[in-house]
């Protein structure tokens, strides 16, 4: 699994410069987006199979209880967000999407765990270099915040920081989705439109 975390954080374990050039057509510095087009090594392949099995098991467990999401599982969010967009492994991609949006996002959790989710998402935004992963993270937050509004009342500042950060992302799609997320938070009355918010948005 360590190799998968390397992919998420933009590292290049066991991938040579010649492999990268062949996959991307350039010798420029790699990103997580370019990594997605490289055929996984044997170790990476096994790790992906393990992750697929883990995600499918967690999804089954999530259907049995409304309060199943614990701190160790919350730490897996960056992995799920990244591999939701996996192009080489369709089963892994669909499993991560189902678990993240239908398993994690609507789960009801404690105030402490809600704070941890937002902290993990914040760290994910800071480290993530692939715009598709940022897009997936925003879609996750839309459902998660709506499902846990009362547990997240004290996390409004952190949530707004994440959203405003992504509203200035270089990728147009990310900026649009971040703006939609902010509108959704206002529409469901989680965020009130007051002068500080207007000044910050401008």
Image: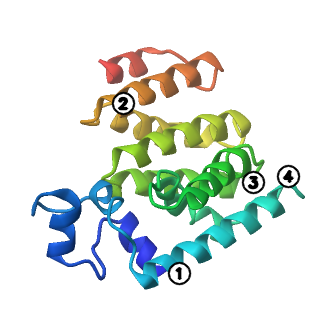
Distance of label 4 from label 2 (alpha carbons): 32 Å
* Residue linked to disc 2: 173
- Indicate which disc, 2 or 3, sits on the residue closer to the N terminus: 3
**Picture disc at residue 66:** 4
- Indicate which disc, 1 or 2, sits on the residue closer to the N terminus: 1
What residue is at 67 percent from the left and 58 percent from the top? 113
Callout 1: helix, strand or loop? helix
Viewer-nearest residue: 44 or 113: 44
Distance of label 1 from label 2 (alpha carbons): 32 Å
Callout 4: helix, strand or loop? loop
Callout 3: helix, strand or loop? loop
What residue is at 43 percent from the left and 48 percent from the top? 133
- Indicate which disc, 4 or 2, sits on the residue closer to the N terminus: 4
Q: Residue 127, how many percent across, how many down?
A: 34, 58
Distance of label 2 from label 3 (alpha carbons): 32 Å
Q: Residue 165, how many percent across, how many down?
A: 34, 38
Viewer-nearest residue: 108 or 50: 50
* Residue linked to disc 3: 110
């Amino acid at each position: 699994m360590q190799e998968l975390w390397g992919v998420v954080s933009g590292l290049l374990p066991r991938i040579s410069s010649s492999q990268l050039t062949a996959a991307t057509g350039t010798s420029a510095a790699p990103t997580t987006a370019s990594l997605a087009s490289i055929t996984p090594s044997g170790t990476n392949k096994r790790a992906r199979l393990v992750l697929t099995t883990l995600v499918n098991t967690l999804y089954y467990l999530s259907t049995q209880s409304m309060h199943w999401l614990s701190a160790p599982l919350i730490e897996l969010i960056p992995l799920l967000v990244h591999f939701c967009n996996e192009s080489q492994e369709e089963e892994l991609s669909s499993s991560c999407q189902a678990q993240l949006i239908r398993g994690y996002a609507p789960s009801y959790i404690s105030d402490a765990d809600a704070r941890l989710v937002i902290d993990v998402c914040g760290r994910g935004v800071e480290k993530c270099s692939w715009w598709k992963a940022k897009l997936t993270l925003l879609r996750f937050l839309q459902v998660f915040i709506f499902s846990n509004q009362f547990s997240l009342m004290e996390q409004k500042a952190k949530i707004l920081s994440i959203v405003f950060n992504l509203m200035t992302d270089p990728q147009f799609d990310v900026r649009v989705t971040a703006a939609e997320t902010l509108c959704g938070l206002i529409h469901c009355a989680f965020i009130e439109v007051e002068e500080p918010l207007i000044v910050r948005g401008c």
